[in-house]
């Protein structure tokens, strides 16, 4: 009987050895999920940082790069710090704003991606040939290319105003909206409010932009956060999910370029 029991450890050892496989696969799946979650978080952070850069550039363009003399820029910096945007991202965006203000030339480059999406890339550069070459490399590495797509866009005016949150904020925004529509604004939308400000965005013809901005500036309690000419797609293109991811990666790569001020696409999702 003792000899029969002595053979028991061998099959047990085999079963124990095989039982380690599920543990290895479980670890692999867990790491895959962690990587996927991390990738999604990184993409979200990248998008947030790019929006922060654009907000700073827009505010600096309209009032300079000194927040002590530019209330719109001061408000943007306060909001970004409250959102825990890292200081080095803010400093990089401010450095780009200085470059934009001092650059000798603004250039717009046109491109096409995903076979049907038009892209307008607005830049501030002192060397257009160098900028064009580096942009071409970014595009080509992501199956996009330089191409004339200006016919897919129109130019229009865009103004963003803000008012301090408080008991009178809603009434003031209503009054500002009525004023803007009477002075040539063609459309408007309410933006997500921050802790300190409520904001509205107005759209107008290019010929109306200057006068409309001046009229809104006269209104007490209203801050002009943005006033500029931008590109709007004539028709927006619907993309499948896989192409949307490819286009988002391309846009982020373009926006990370030091010379790029703004990237506009004809895609509905971006």
Image (tube, rainbow, N blue to C red):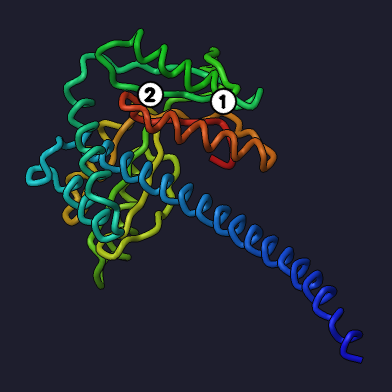
Q: Name which residue lies at 16% across and 49% down.
A: 74
- Give the secondary structure at mark 2: strand
Q: Which quarter of the figure is the N terminus placed in?
A: bottom right
Residue under label 2, please give it.
Answer: 122
Which quadrant of the view contains residue 67?
Answer: top left
Q: Where is residue 207 in the image (x, y as percent from the top left)?
A: 34, 26
Q: Where is residue 139 in the image (x, y as percent from the top left)?
A: 51, 21
Position of 174 compared to 87: left or right? right
Q: Residue 249 carries which label?
A: none
Residue 103, above or below 30:
above
Position of 115 compared to 247: left or right? right
Residue under label 1, please give it.
Answer: 142
Residue situated in front as seen by the camera: 88 or 125: 88
Q: Where is residue 18 in the image (x, y as percent from the top left)?
A: 78, 66
Q: Where is residue 172 in the image (x, y as percent from the top left)?
A: 27, 61
Q: How far apart are marks 1 and 2 (CA)?
A: 19 Å
Which quadrant of the view contains residue 171?
Answer: bottom left
Q: Name which residue lies at 26% across and 56% down.
A: 79
Residue situated in front as seen by the camera: 19 or 70: 19
């Amino acid at each position: 009987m003792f000899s029969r029991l002595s053979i028991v450890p061998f099959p047990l050892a085999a079963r124990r050895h095989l039982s380690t496989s599920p543990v290895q696969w479980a670890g692999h799946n867990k790491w895959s999920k962690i990587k996927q979650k991390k990738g999604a978080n990184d993409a979200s952070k990248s998008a947030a940082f790019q929006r922060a850069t654009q907000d700073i550039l827009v505010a600096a363009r309209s009032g300079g790069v000194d927040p002590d003399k530019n209330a719109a820029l001061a408000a943007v910096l306060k909001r970004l710090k409250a959102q825990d945007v890292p200081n080095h991202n803010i400093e990089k965006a401010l450095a780009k704003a200085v470059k934009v203000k001092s650059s000798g030339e603004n250039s717009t480059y046109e491109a096409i991606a995903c076979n049907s999406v038009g892209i307008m890339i607005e830049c501030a550069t002192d060397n257009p040939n160098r900028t064009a070459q580096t942009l071409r490399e970014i595009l080509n590495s992501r199956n996009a290319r330089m191409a004339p797509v200006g016919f897919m866009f129109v130019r229009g005016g865009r103004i963003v105003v803000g008012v301090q949150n408080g008991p009178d904020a809603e009434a003031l925004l209503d009054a500002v909206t009525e004023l803007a529509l009477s002075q040539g604004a063609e459309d408007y939308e309410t933006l997500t409010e921050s802790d300190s400000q409520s904001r509205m965005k107005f759209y107008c013809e290019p010929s109306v932009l200057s006068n409309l901005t001046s009229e809104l500036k006269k209104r007490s309690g209203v801050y002009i956060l943005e006033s500029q000419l931008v590109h709007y797609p004539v028709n927006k293109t619907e993309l499948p999910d896989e192409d949307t991811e490819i286009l988002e990666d391309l846009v982020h790569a373009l926006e990370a370029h030091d010379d790029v001020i703004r990237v506009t696409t004809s895609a509905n999702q971006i």
